[in-house]
Amino acid sequence: MYADCHAVRSARKVFEEMTVKDVVTWSSMIAAYVASNSPLDAFRVFHQMGQTNVKPNSVTLVSLLSACTKMLDVRAGESIHSYLIMSHMNMDVALGTALFDMYAKCGKINEAVVVFNSMDGKNLQSYTVMMSVLADHGRHKDVLSLFNNMEDMGLQPDSLAFAVILSACSHAGLVCEGRRYFDRMVRMYDIKPSVEHYGCMVDLLGRSGLIQEAYDIIKGMPMEPNGIILRSFLAACRNHGWIPSLDADFLSKLESELGANYVLAANVFSTFASWKDANNIRLAMKQKGLEKIPGCSWVEV
């Protein structure tokens, strides 16, 4: 209860007061630390668990693999994998999914594929997670193949699975495939498209230079487009040097407190030599005291 309420210190206090602790007790404490984003404390508890000769079960190892993923510690994850093999522990769907997700998040995509293929039982969640990690590593053709394999296995894709496949089509520039999957989602599986699905289609069409079709999707959405969709569309307009006539209502839907939106809109107008509109936007940005936050990145070794 304390852990679910994010009161991990109180949870630890109750844990320490218990005179008898079984595998469920230890696993719960480990999971509490993982959920509170304290993976090192989770491993410390696991070490104490080993000193009491209580053997971990699959639930324990799922939490530890999640801790490895948070820390991007592939060596610790490999140690858990070795323990699985040496102890002949049955790799259920949850444990297998946590294991290949750890490998993938740590950049070991080939190892993740091996683990996934070795799993006896796979459910919709494991397929969706595998498609997501393949997409993250740019293996978009493999995503499409896995999606079709999932359907052949008799698993019915849900809204999240279609969001993953549409995103993969977008980044791979697969326009025809993206249209087909979107149509299949609506007609065959009767799934109502969400903002994320529409966003993927706008991004897909925008990247491919089909600006007018992307604009028609935005105008035909049954809900208000969010700032991500509008920025994606404007960026596509700028990149391809073409834009339909935008009304004031369209531009007003962009978040007014983000300086990047003003810069992007000004750049679009500048592309078409509409200097007056571009200057007006930059002037409004200065009057509000907004600045575009510069991009940054880092590599952690």
Image (spheres, rainbow, N blue to C red):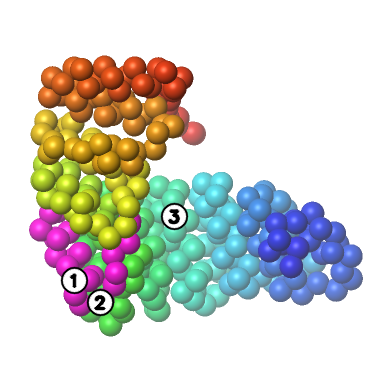
Of labels 3 and 2, the one closer to you: 2
Residue 184, which numbered label? 1
Q: Specify whether residue 203 is in view.
A: yes
Q: Residue at 49% of width from left, 34% of height from top?
A: 301
**The residue stretch that appears in magenta:** 172-196
Left or right: where 107 falls relative to 201: right
Q: Secondary structure at mark 1?
A: helix
On screen, residue 262 above or below 188: above
> Where is residue 85 drawn, in percent x and y?
52, 69
Amino acid type, label 2: Tyr
Q: Secondary structure at mark 2?
A: loop
On screen, residue 119 above or below 209: below
Q: Residue at 80% of width from left, 66% of height from top?
A: 52
Left or right: where 284 falls relative to 8: left
Residue 103, which numbered label? 3
Task: Name the residue carrying label 2.
Answer: 189
Mark 2 in CB contact with mark 1 (< 8 angstroms):
yes
Residue 158, which numbered label? none
